[in-house]
Amino acid sequence: MNSFSAPESYVPDIVGAQMLSLPSEFLSRPSLAIATFVVVLLACLLSLSTKTRKRNGYFKNESGDQLREYGKDTFAMRFTHGQVLSDEGRKLAGEDPYLVRNGPFRELVIFSPAHLQEFLRKDAKGHWKPKNMNAGDWAGRILGQCVGQQNGPKWKTMRSHFDPEFSHLASMGMLPGFSNEIERWVDGLSTNPIGESKMPGGFVQDTVQAGKYLAFRLISMSVYGDAFTEARFARLLELSKVHTQVLITGIIKQKTTSWWYNQLPTQEKRLMSSFQSQWRAFNEQVVKDSREHGISCPAERIYHGVDSGDMSRIEFLQTVDEMLFANIDITGSIIAFIVVNLASNQSFQERLRVEIEKQKQSKSYNYESYITKQDTLLHYLTLESLRVTPAMYFSAPECTSQPKRIDGYLIPPNMPTIIDVRRLNTHPSVWGEGQDAQAFRPERFQTMPPSAYKNALLRFGIGASKCMGKNMADLMIKLSALRVLERYVLVKGDSKDSGLGGYTVSKNGEVEFLPLGDKGGK
Ligand code: HEM
Ligand SMILES: *[C@@H]1O[C@H](CO)[C@@H](O)[C@H](O)[C@H]1NC(C)=O
Ligand SMILES: *[C@@H]1O[C@H](CO)[C@@H](O)[C@H](O)[C@H]1NC(C)=O
């Protein structure tokens, strides 16, 4: 058994994190008559809007050419076979944007910096998240009320309670704890390897499992602060397994996207309810204990927002779920890809090790300031790794508010739009023609000011960047890379495939770790 086999989930953040439902208070007690009426009304509106859209020349360019539409339903495929969808979209529409179906919805796929520029022009502040994140009723029930699904004043109010706990300053305060934890994790890498190496002391490890385990520990610590205990972590592991089952159900069993289907007392409904009540009990207990014993706990402080009526208990619970369970995959994969990418290029790895040695020779060296610098190879490593191996293929749908003309095509207002992330992050208009755009070459950032890749690099969100964990995640991933490089030379296992194309169902995160001897250490 691998010691890092903990959170099993392979469903990316976006599935869980980015979905919204009709208000469940409304949905939970509609009479059949009202529901039928609503459906009929929607059908009428829909046919009306299709007519107007055609009349207005929507989805056409000035010579009357129509946007291409991909034939298959991309509901599950965008997560499970994202690279296939990306390739087929390119074959279908070349450099033009195109339409995809997502269950009953139609979405626009964009992927060039020029598309992004038009997408964000003038109305970026008016963009909004579609109901259920266009992923149906099941997703809405799990995470439909988390902060990532909110718009407008509600979003602002909720963020005002969460943000202070995850600011840059707060994240810096977490560093000593993170650092201990990461060192223990690096130690643990050698204890339960998945394979052997010819080098003495060397071993092979599955970086994806290991990365997810670390992400889960670190994010749990950040959410519960001093209330984080081993007993609670064990409980969170159990809960995460149930959560994963619940999330996966929503993807592989497309029937669950239907509100009607979910009225049935199914096995999977029981599992969801069971998760929800256990999750609520767990968090309420942590808040109660922290208050009784004066324990410093971010979740407890955030809970004041529930006490004051600024957010509901469900909104709180789903946001903590979003941060914790839904983000294990994202953060864990990112940590894994950094290790895999380093292993794929010895020459860069060596240059970075030299930088680390040099930093340490400086009298004023401390790891805190090194990992916050923006002009180091360590920093470029994280930019480049997120560029070529993003954690998700497609962003969650976001709706425009104004009509747009993207690449000549007239796009109606309120159009749900998704971004082909890797295609954007390697687009030739910014990243160069030819192979170099795809290559992992962190040094490219030495000569590129951020303005040179505006709208061309999607990491924590584009435009008004919205990832709540970005300060913390940035520190986590840099410190993990630093600590691993201090101890090991990383060599890519047999698989030629460096992990590209496999980042949602990552089976190829195997890396050989060769100890560096006494050179490393703190
Ligand atoms: C390297 C790791 C991570 C990456 C690449 C990442 C990326 C993203 C992206 C692209 C979004 C969507 C932003 C948008 O709507 O425009 C997002 C949202 C979010 N992320 Fe992260 N994330 C990471 C780690 C984390 C962590 C560790 C947390 C835990 C606190 C977190 C919490 C959130 C939340 C709560 C949202 C929704 C925010 C909102 O819409 O208000 N993320 N993230
Ligand atoms: C409309 O799109 C077609 C197909 O991409 C292209 O050949 C044509 O030049 C476009 N017309 C205009 C006016 O952009
Ligand atoms: C590895 O990194 C070096 C820079 O350190 C770069 O010049 C080289 O092209 C990279 N090799 C590959 C195979 O990407």
Image: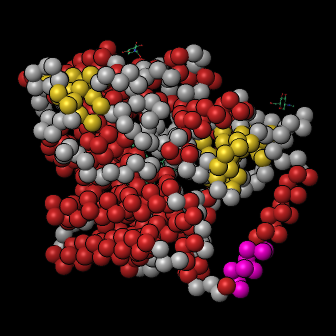
Q: Quadrant of residue 509?
A: top left
Image vertical order of residue 153 relative to residue 191, above or below: below
Q: Where is residue 350 in the image (x, y as percent from the top left)?
A: 27, 17
Q: What stretch is highlighted in magenta?
A: 33-41
In this image, 105 relative to 431: left or right? right
Can residue 223 be seen here? The reply is: yes
Q: Position of residue 8 (x, y in %)?
A: 32, 51
Query: Which residue does the image show at 71% across and 33% down from the upper left?
Result: 92
Q: Quadrant of residue 303?
A: bottom left
Query: Which residue does the image show at 71% across and 86% down from the upper left?
Result: 33
Query: Which residue does the image show at 39% across and 38% down from the upper left?
Result: 506
Q: Does the magenta stretch include residue 234?
A: no
Can residue 303 be seen here? The reply is: no
In this image, 147 relative to 48: left or right? left
Q: In which quarter of the image is residue 399?
A: bottom right
By secondary structure, the bulk of the magenta-drawn segment is best described as helix
